[in-house]
Amino acid sequence: MVARNTGYNAPVLYKAFAILEEIARNQSGLGVSDLARRLAISKSTVYGITQALTEIGALRQDAETKRFTLGPTLVQLGNQALAGVDIRSVARPYMEELSQEFKETVFMGTFDEYGITIIEKADSPQELKISAPVGARIPIFAGAAGKVFLANLKEEVLNKILRDRSLPKYTENSITDPQNYRKELEKVRREGYATDFGEYIKGVNAISVPLRDSWGWPVAALWMVGFSHSFTGEKIDQAILATSKAAAKIGEVLKGKYS
């Protein structure tokens, strides 16, 4: 719940945050009547606040159900907060350990509706390696990392993305059929990790796992990339297991910091 101090009060601001928190706890979305009833706030007040939050992108309203879900502005703000020193300093030792163990590059990134931002990396110790600078942006459909984020979106948000944008053909292995891509995302949800076998960059394989918040949402992702002639088979299986364990440990440390 939003903490209230004994100093200056801004009732509308408290109500706005209460609405955001209530919507965040209900992944299927809530309408004006639902929010008014749950929070004991008048419908007219809820309506005014939700319309203002929708206008600035903090909320999104489904055109058919009229239910509200969190919008892209909050995603971007959350990603900027996560790009700060805490998550990077916590994750860095685990990323370096993975990089040294598997001799591959490990990235961490955050997501918004327009793409993925690399916020940390641990380069492979090998002379010949795959790398990209911190701060670089990669497309929303980019390989394993894109699958991890997209697989965990609300169904209506995913539907809109797949409806409004065509799946790009980066290589001959890219999944460009929406139905097949949905099946791939279902597999990611079921297994808890994503793979990419030359789908984004020819000759490059990757695995990715989510870094989840206390509500279970993937606020960031870790992914490991390597050349397809060496990063394959049993090595990939072991990398998935080790990266998943690292993500769980990072999550536990972060929960301790913010609890």
Image: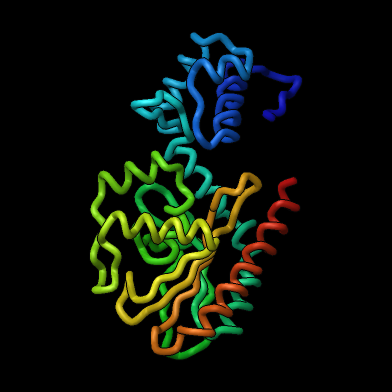
Residue 54, x across and y down, in percent: 41, 27
Instruction: Check the image and report above or below for 120 versus 178.
Output: below
Is residue 222 visible in the rendered structure shown here? yes
Which image quarter holds the C terminus? top right
- Return the residue nearer the eye: 209 or 254: 209
Which residue appears at 56% of the width and 77% of the height? 239
Left or right position of 212 against 148: right
Residue 128, x across and y down, in percent: 42, 89
Which residue appears at 42% of the width and 20% of the height? 51
Which image quarter holds the N terminus? top right
Please, which colouring scheme is shown?
rainbow
In the figure, residue 142 lies in which quadrant?
Answer: bottom left
Residue 246, x across and y down, in percent: 64, 68
Which residue appears at 44% of the width and 81% of the height? 226
Is residue 10 visible in the rendered structure shown here? no
- Return the residue nearer the eye: 144 or 49: 144
Q: How many marks?
A: 0
- Return the residue nearer the eye: 183 or 38: 183
Which residue appears at 48% of the width and 71% of the height? 207
Residue 88, x across and y down, in percent: 59, 62
Left or right position of 174 against 213: left
